[in-house]
Amino acid sequence: MRRPGRPAIALLLAVAVLQPGVPLAAELDVGGYLGGETRIFPRSPAFEGQDDTRASVSLVAQPEFRLDLGDGDDQLTFIPFGRWDSHDNRRTHADIREANWLHVAESWDVEVGIGQVFWGVTESRHLVDIVNQLDQVEGIEGDAKLGQPMVNLNLLSDYGTFRFYALPFFRERTFPSDDARLRGPLPINVNDASFGKNAGHDEVALAARYTNSMGPFDLGLSYFHGTGRDPTLVPKAKPDGSQHF
């Protein structure tokens, strides 16, 4: 399992120790949630190869740690995530949702590390919400996201807010197991991903967004240069004649 959060954690520790003028006293805010979930499947599986279990149990934990440094202009955030599932082994997984340093100035702020970004409002399909990759083993609704390494600079002005992102490291989407009840008609081989020319896991994507409020209207303009987060699923034949993505 990849652990892209390790460099970010080391960076946060370095910032906490080396930043000049930070007093020893700091305020730590601890939160998060711990819970359980039960899925009930009253009908038989729809596709061949799916587990015929009628109930699936899982446990989930997401603690949140936020440390305010100095006079409140700097903050360290660490939000890990983990789930154990009784049937879907791909849904048993862990991730670092956030692990970053935020510095806030009068007309700008900068965030370095692993973060979560939401672009959109209340629409059911967030067409421009493309910075973070989806954590699709969490649910078919597409609201859960994987943490994305990033450097984010925001400029605040009377003419609106300008947000700029450098996004090193591409993260592949997670998918349910081959025998999971909430998978599509064909299983997905998560170890057979291919990328276009000059693209890959080490690609650095760039993004920008401008937002402004003008009376009853909200304006948002978005730009993204890099590999799209939505994969194209291509059917392939197995040696036994069956198909998968």
Image: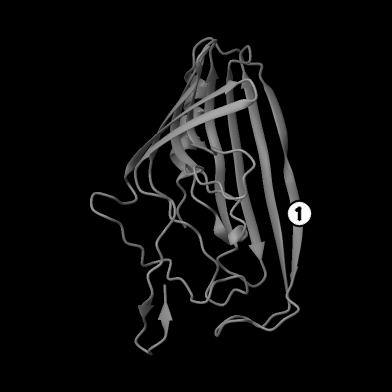
Three-letter amino acid code at the position of disc 1: Gly
Quarter of the rendering containing residue 217:
top right
Which of the pair 28/186 is nearer the observer? 186
* Residue at the image position 59 percent from the left and 63 percent from the top: 91
Which of the pair 194/76 is nearer the observer? 194
- As drawn, which residue projects farthest toward the left? 197
* Residue at the image position 50 percent from the left and 59 percent from the top: 174
- Vertical order, 14 against 167 (above or below): above
Q: At which x and y percent is residue 10?
A: 47, 34
Q: At which x and y percent is residue 237?
A: 36, 81
| Label 1 environment density (alpha carbons within 10 Å; few <14, some 14–19, many ≥20) | few
Which of the pair 176/206 is nearer the observer? 206
- As drawn, which residue projects farthest toward the bottom? 240
* Residue at the image position 53 percent from the left and 19 percent from the top: 103
User: In the visual, does 38 lie left or right of 203?
Assistant: right
* Residue at the image position 55 percent from the left and 50 percent from the top: 95
Q: At which x and y percent is residue 169?
A: 38, 44
Q: Where is mark 1, residue-wise?
A: 35
**Numbered disc 1: secondary structure:** strand
User: In the visual, does 182 lie left or right of 241?
Assistant: right
Q: Quadrant of the C terminus?
A: bottom left
Q: At which x and y percent is residue 131?
A: 47, 41
Quarter of the rendering containing residue 177:
bottom right
- Vertical order, 197 against 163 (above or below): below
